[in-house]
């Protein structure tokens, strides 16, 4: 009985402490209270009904410097990628490379005719050579095309999205094959397909990040808007009736269908319609072109067509139709390929480069695939649920993070992804002791310099904070949903920032920051919150 009473007393004491912590706006320990200058930002009118959480620690000692609601689970959105990419880096190694081979099935005659099928075995290589810079690094832009539709614009990377497929095709031709008297098949059995945010099922094969980029350029009022798309393939084409309206008309670009479900069928097409006001200054980039994207909803069928077309450019004829569903019924037993039958292979950039791409631009599908790659490397798991379970065990055993400190549904931060500030800080500190830390650190966006933090520059208006540029290395996270209290209106459920700061004092700190449930009217309001968090990060640089 006494033990029961004591446990009850401890329970209610903990609840009372948590209440005091929240209502006082900081930690019970006054030594970790948030400075007044930062609280002034957090108490702006825009955040009247919002909730903030923050924790700042000395990276080496773990001593808590500032603490605000850090033991409360909060929406963190893409800050979740710190966990999935960190675990995958540890499991695979920064220098790991994915190899995508092509095998022939059957014999090749003296005239170069392959009587059989050609099979590409997908490895989960995210870029397939389509973002390769001359120095071997992976190209990215500050406004990546993966978010073009949600943010309203993008900047396309410059490498040829089909470069890897062209390389594979050239190798097939060099092996002596001139004709494939059979079919071309994508072996996409590396892991079980998983649903990506109700858009499509992700598979371990990619072309241009499973997107068709449509570019629009400026035209005079009343004229059709010039457009183009990439990659060019018989697998998918684009039509447009988009026109330029009056200067006071509304921007309205409609894509139909979205996503297209016709991949693998002849005459698969997407249509663009709507209006672009004359004199429009495109959001984010302040310059044309405007970018929108169609989702490739059947990656394997699309990649098959792209490969057959690359083979044709290399002088290799395929007797099977180029546009058709991927014929998985022709695949041999998984893992039964003989090395003597290999005729080509594509080797990826080091995995550290893929993680850099994922975190710099917050590439959601890449983070989800990283979780799958971790599951495969950790215990052979081939499902999303199995990989999440493997990650849960790793977080507990290696980082001391209990399942009660987070809620993850995928590898990228989709849906109601939450975590405590304490859990995020534990991951950041734990990664700092790992062999892959240098690559992990290098993958993070840099304040005012690159990736998703490139345009966060408002803090520079204060000359005392300007030195923070280039000294904050942090992952961003944005979660916008419908405001349940005002149906039809958006709400910023979570805007988060977490990573490392090389402080003005010379020491390195780890920090976590998020604000939840901010009423907004649109993207400009989100960018304002983003700028406020950048300013807070700059303040931390100055104070520490």
Image: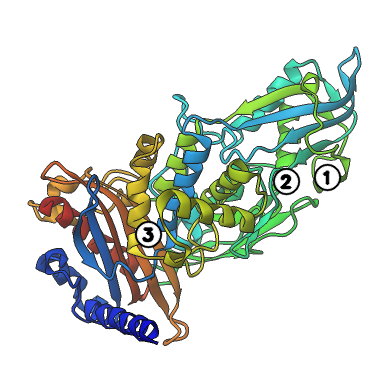
- Circle 3: is it few (<14), some (14-19), or many (20+) Cα within 10 Å? many
Q: Which mark is residue 423?
A: 3
Quote the CA–CA distance across marks 2 and 3. Answer: 37 Å
Q: Is residue 226 visible?
A: no
- Circle 2: is it few (<14), some (14-19), or many (20+) Cα within 10 Å? many
| Residue 504 image offset from top left, x and y in percent | 12, 45
Number of disc labels: 3
- Circle 1: is it few (<14), some (14-19), or many (20+) Cα within 10 Å? some
Do the numbered discs 3 and 1 sit on residues whose CB atoms are within 8 Å?
no
Residue drawn at (69%, 47%) of the image: 191
| Residue 469 image offset from top left, x and y in percent | 20, 46
Question: In the drawing, does residue 46 fall left or right of residue 257?
Answer: left
Quarter residue 106 falls in: top right
Disc with the residue nearer the chain's start (2 vs 3): 2
Do the numbered discs 2 and 1 sit on residues whose CB atoms are within 8 Å?
yes
Quote the CA–CA distance across marks 3 and 1. Answer: 42 Å
In front here: 399 or 486? Answer: 399
| Residue 484 image offset from top left, x and y in percent | 45, 84
Residue under label 2: 300
Does 227 sit above or below residue 21?
A: above
- Report helix, strand or loop for mark 1: helix
Of tags 3 and 1, the one toward the viewer is 3
Of tags 2 and 1, the one toward the viewer is 1
Do the numbered discs 2 and 3 sit on residues whose CB atoms are within 8 Å?
no
Q: Which mark is residue 328?
A: 1
| Residue 57 image offset from top left, x and y in percent | 23, 54
Disc with the residue nearer the chain's start (2 vs 1): 2
Residue drawn at (32%, 48%) of the image: 429
């Amino acid at each position: 009985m006494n033990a029961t009473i004591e446990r009850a007393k401890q329970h209610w004491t903990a609840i009372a402490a948590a209440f005091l912590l929240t209502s006082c706006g900081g930690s019970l320990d006054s030594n970790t209270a948030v400075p007044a200058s930062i609280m002034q930002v957090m108490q702006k009118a825009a955040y009247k009904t919002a909730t903030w959480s923050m924790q700042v620690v000395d990276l080496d000692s773990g001593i808590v410097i500032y603490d605000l609601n850090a033991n409360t689970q909060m929406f963190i959105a893409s800050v979740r990628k710190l966990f999935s990419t960190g675990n995958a880096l540890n499991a695979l190694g920064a220098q790991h490379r994915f190899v995508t081979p092509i095998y022939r099935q059957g014999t090749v005659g003296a005239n170069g005719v392959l009587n059989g099928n050609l099979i590409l075995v997908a490895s989960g290589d995210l870029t397939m050579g389509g973002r390769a810079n001359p120095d071997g690094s992976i190209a990215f832009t500050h406004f990546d095309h993966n978010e073009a539709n949600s943010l309203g614009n993008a900047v396309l990377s410059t490498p040829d999205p089909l470069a890897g497929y062209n390389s594979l095709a050239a190798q097939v031709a060099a092996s002596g094959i001139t004709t494939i008297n059979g079919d071309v098949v994508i072996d996409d059995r590396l892991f079980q397909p998983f649903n990506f945010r109700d858009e499509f099922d992700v598979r371990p094969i990619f072309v241009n990040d499973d997107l068709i980029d449509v570019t629009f350029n400026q035209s005079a009022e009343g004229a059709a808007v010039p457009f183009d798309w990439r990659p060019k393939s018989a697998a998918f084409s684009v039509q447009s009736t988009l026109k330029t309206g009056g200067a006071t008309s509304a921007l309205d670009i409609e894509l139909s269908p979205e996503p297209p479900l016709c991949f693998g069928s002849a005459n698969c097409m997407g249509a663009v319609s709507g209006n672009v006001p004359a004199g429009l200054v495109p959001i984010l980039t302040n310059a044309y072109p405007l970018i929108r994207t169609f989702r490739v909803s059947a990656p394997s069928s699309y990649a098959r067509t792209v490969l057959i077309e690359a083979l044709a450019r290399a002088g290799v004829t395929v007797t099977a139709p180029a546009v058709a569903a991927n014929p998985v019924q022709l695949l041999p037993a998984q893992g039964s390929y003989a090395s003597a039958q290999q005729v080509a292979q594509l080797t990826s950039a080091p995995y550290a480069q893929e993680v850099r791409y994922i975190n710099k631009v917050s590439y959601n599908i890449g983070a989800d695939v990283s979780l799958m790659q971790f599951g495969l490397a950790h215990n052979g798991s081939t499902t999303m649920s199995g990989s999440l379970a493997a990650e849960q065990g790793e977080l507990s055993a290696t980082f001391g993070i209990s399942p009660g400190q987070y809620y993850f549904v995928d590898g990228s931060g989709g849906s109601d992804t939450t975590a405590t500030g304490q859990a995020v800080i534990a991951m950041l500190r734990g990664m700092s002791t790992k062999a892959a830390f240098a690559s992990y650190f290098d993958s993070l966006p840099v304040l005012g310099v690159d990736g998703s933090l490139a345009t966060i520059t408002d803090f520079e208006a204060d000359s005392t904070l300007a030195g923070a540029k280039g000294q904050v290395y942090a992952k961003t996270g944005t979660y916008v949903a419908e405001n349940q209290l005002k149906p039809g209106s958006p709400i910023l459920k979570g805007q988060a920032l977490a990573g490392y700061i090389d402080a003005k004092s010379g020491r390195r700190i780890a920090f976590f920051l998020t604000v939840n449930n901010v009423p907004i009217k649109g993207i400009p309001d989100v960018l304002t919150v983003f700028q406020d968090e950048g300013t807070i990060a700059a303040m931390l640089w100055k104070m520490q």
